[in-house]
Image (cartoon, rainbow, N blue to C red):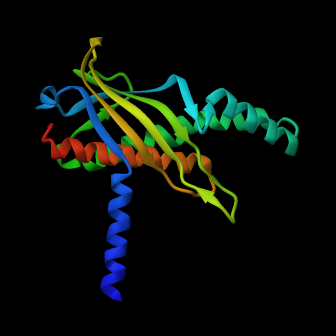
């Protein structure tokens, strides 16, 4: 029985990892050799999808629901939605990326410090998930990660697709989605280590 339980836990762990896909769609990683400082820029696609619809549709729906509960709370919800990017999503990505690459002394720079290359993390899809106590759904995100020359951003060195990076099903939406960014960064950094990029 104990062996069966361990096998089951291992299977679930493998399935969770395999649910996220990382694919190199253009370029190679040779340019990263010897690099220990990489610029990072977070963008959100102009056609960003949230759940089954557009981001605008999702925001309007959630604002309307918030207003029904308390007048004036819709705008507060909208502000919180956008602030989650800098409070949860982006810091989580940077933290986990650097943690995995700690032994390589690789740092991400998001404050304009000079770097030869910049990594552009562009979110294309967000499944915000939900948690209503009796039922919940995990968050997930899709994104592209493109490395460009900092001095010449039109010159792409490599481009990756990251699909279905899983988050959590906790009560707070920012934390749910933030964990998706953490997982994306963690497994992308592990991918780079496996490919001996640095």
Q: In this view, does 102 lie above or below 2?
A: above
Horizontal side of 13 relative to 79 (left or right) equals: left
Q: Which of 46 and 43 is in front in this view?
A: 46
118, above or below 138, in the image: above
Q: Position of residue 54 (x, y in %)?
A: 62, 29
Q: Which of 71 and 8 is in front in this view?
A: 8
**From the image, which quarter does the C terminus lie in?**
top left
| Residue drawn at 30 percent across, 84 percent down | 3
Q: In this view, does 168 lie to the left or right of 186?
A: right
Question: Could you tell whether 129 is left or right of 98 in the image?
Answer: right
Q: Residue at 30% x, 49% y: name it.
A: 99
In the rendered image, residue 169, in percent from the top left (x then y), is placed at 56, 57
Q: Residue at x 49, y 24 (%)?
A: 45
Q: In which quarter of the image is the N terminus?
A: bottom left
Up-down relation of residue 103 to residue 89 (above or below): below
Q: Quadrant of residue 58?
A: top right
Q: Write the residue at 63% across / 37% down.
A: 81
Number of marks present in the image shown? 0
Whether residue 158 sits left or right of residue 41 in the image: it is left
Residue situated in front as seen by the camera: 21 or 110: 21
* Quadrant of res 181: top left
Residue 65, x across and y down, in percent: 80, 41
Farthest residue toward the bottom?
1
Is 148 above or below relative to 107?
above
> How far across and how far down the image is residue 32, in percent?
16, 30
């Amino acid at each position: 029985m104990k062996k069966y339980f361990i096998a089951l836990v291992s299977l679930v762990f493998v399935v969770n990892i395999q649910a996220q896909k990382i694919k190199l769609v253009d370029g190679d990683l040779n340019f990263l050799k010897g690099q220990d400082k990489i610029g990072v820029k977070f963008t959100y696609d102009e056609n960003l999808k949230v759940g089954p619809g557009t981001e605008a549709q999702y925001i309007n729906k959630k604002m309307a629901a918030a207003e029904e509960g308390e007048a004036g709370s819709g705008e507060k919800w909208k502000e919180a939605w956008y602030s989650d990017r800098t409070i949860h999503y982006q810091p989580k990505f940077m933290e986990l990326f650097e943690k995995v690459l700690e032994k390589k002394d690789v740092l991400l720079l998001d404050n304009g410090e000079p770097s030869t290359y910049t990594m552009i993390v562009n979110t294309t899809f967000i499944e915000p998930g939900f948690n209503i106590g009796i039922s919940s759904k995990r968050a997930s995100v899709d994104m592209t990660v493109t490395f460009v020359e900092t001095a010449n951003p039109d010159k792409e060195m490599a481009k990756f697709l990251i699909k279905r990076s899983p988050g959590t099903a906790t009560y707070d939406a920012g934390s749910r989605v933030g964990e998706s960014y953490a997982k994306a960064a963690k497994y992308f950094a592990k991918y780079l280590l496996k490919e001996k990029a640095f």
